[in-house]
Every structure is written in C-alpha cells, then in structure tokens.
Image (cartoon, helix red, strand yellow):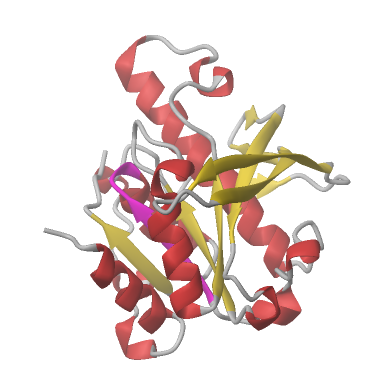
Amino acid sequence: MFSRASLLLSLAATLTNADAFVSPATYSRNSALNGLDSDAASSILKKARIVKSLSDLVGKDKDGNEVRVPVKGIERDWSVDDFTADGEFSVDLFLPEDRNEIKGCAFFMHGFSQYPVAYRQTLTEACDSASIAIIAVETGITDGFVWNNTKGKTELNFNLQRALSEDTKQCIRMIMEGDNAFAEYGVTRGAVGNNIAVIGHGLGGGLSFPVAADCNIDYVFSMAPIFG
C-alpha cells in the first residue's frame, strides 16, 4: 500500500537526487497506453494570457487550524489538432511554509473523480519536506468544458484527459517561459530553475509520462497510474 511517508521521501528525492527520477525518455510513447494520443499536434496560441486571483480555498487541518490554498484563474490558450480550447481553468498552489526557500516546482494531476484539494495535506507536507511548490489544475470530471459536445463515456474520458493534460502543460510552459503569474508566491523560473517535475495519481498518474515527455521534463513521480 502506498504511504504518505513514501510520497514525501520520493518527492524530496525527486528534486535532490537524479537517480530517483523516472525519465520519460525511456518510456515508450505508444498512444495505445493512453486514451489521449501523445503524438497529437498541440500548441500554445500566441496571445496575451489573462491571469487573475480567485478566492482562496479555506479549510482546517487536523489540528483545527485554518488552512488557505491560493487559487488563480487562467485563460486557456492551447489547441490540439483542429480543436481550440476556450474559457478559463483554476489552479491551486500548494506552498512550503517558508516561501523564500522554494527550490523547485512540481505539477500535480489528480485522479479521475478527484480534485487537488482532496490531496491537500499530503501535497502540503511534500512541499515542506522538499522545499518545493506544487501547482495543480482543478480541471475535473464536473467541468462544463470537459462535458461540452460529449457523447458517451469514451468521449468524456478523452475530453477529461485532454483538458487535464493540456491545462497542466500550459502551466508548465508558463513557468518555463518566465511568466510571472505565480511570482507573488515566489514561484518563478529563476527560483525553481530546472528543478521541475510532473506528478500524478490514478488517471493523472497515467498522464504524467506523456505530459512530461511533451514538455521535455525528465522528472516524474506517478502513484497508481491508470492508462486509457
């Protein structure tokens, strides 16, 4: 059984020890392994990105202390083949207690029926343990964008995989290109350097490999990955 402790140790190793990495370069990008064809021609449309702050997610930890998760709203600017995305998606930021010591950034993709906040405690502990920020898109199964023009379970699954992976890839590119959308939280290309990883659970775990490969990221950590 996968334990929280092993996640923390693995994430800490991911950004400090190259031997702990699983490189997508060694992973076969056979589209049969995933419902979303990783060879599809995707691109970032060249236009000014609209990024806005949204209300924080507010909850309580196991000790009853208030916990706030910063949220950003980002305009989609990607396309895949003849499909052009529209609308906005929300991004949750999980940060270490000391934001001045951020040494890397991981991009997390959730499971089929989950959302990032369900992993809040584990992700936050990972941030503190490894001194990293974790960026996670909220794009999920209940989003109207995912359900748009969907006919049946197969198309729904495809739409979810495409939206979750492409929204995540847009965030990755934003950091890599020096976008300052997350600068107020200390998450910049200058701060994280090349210490960038992709992590995921379930459906998100299966998508971690093609997403990392498409963005030329060698550092992947996947929990119970599901392909297709």
On the rendered structure, is 165 left or right of 70?
A: left
* Secondary structure, magenta segment, majority class: strand
Task: Report if residue 42 is visible in the image.
Answer: no
How many numbered markers are drawn?
A: 0
Q: What residue sits 33% from the left and 52% below the top?
A: 205
Q: In which quarter of the image is residue 126?
A: bottom left
48, 195: nearer the viewer: 195
How far across and down, in percent of the image, does residue 23 sit?
35, 75
Q: Provide the residue span drawn in magenta.
A: 196-203
Where on the picture, by quarter, is residue 97?
Answer: bottom right
Q: In this view, does 5 lie to the left or right of 16?
A: left
The residue drawn where x is 24% and y is 45% is 226
Q: Can residue 138 be seen in this view?
A: yes
Residue 34 located left or right of residue 52? left
Q: Residue at x 38, y 58 (%)?
A: 122
Q: Which residue lies furthest to the front in this view?
A: 64
Against 29, residue 86 (above or below) is above
Quadrant location, the N terminus: bottom left
Residue at 38 percent across and 20 percent down: it is 155
Vertical order, 149 against 126 (above or below): above
Please check the rendered image and state whether residue 208 is part of the magenta-colored stretch, yes or no: no
Quadrant of the rendering where the C terminus is positioned: top left
Which residue sits furthest right? Answer: 48
Identify whether 111 is placed above or below 176.
Answer: above
Q: Position of residue 12 (x, y in %)?
A: 40, 80
Residue 61's x, y, as percent?
45, 51
Residue 43 screen position, x and y as percent = 66, 48
Q: Nearer the viewer, residue 215 or 56?
A: 56
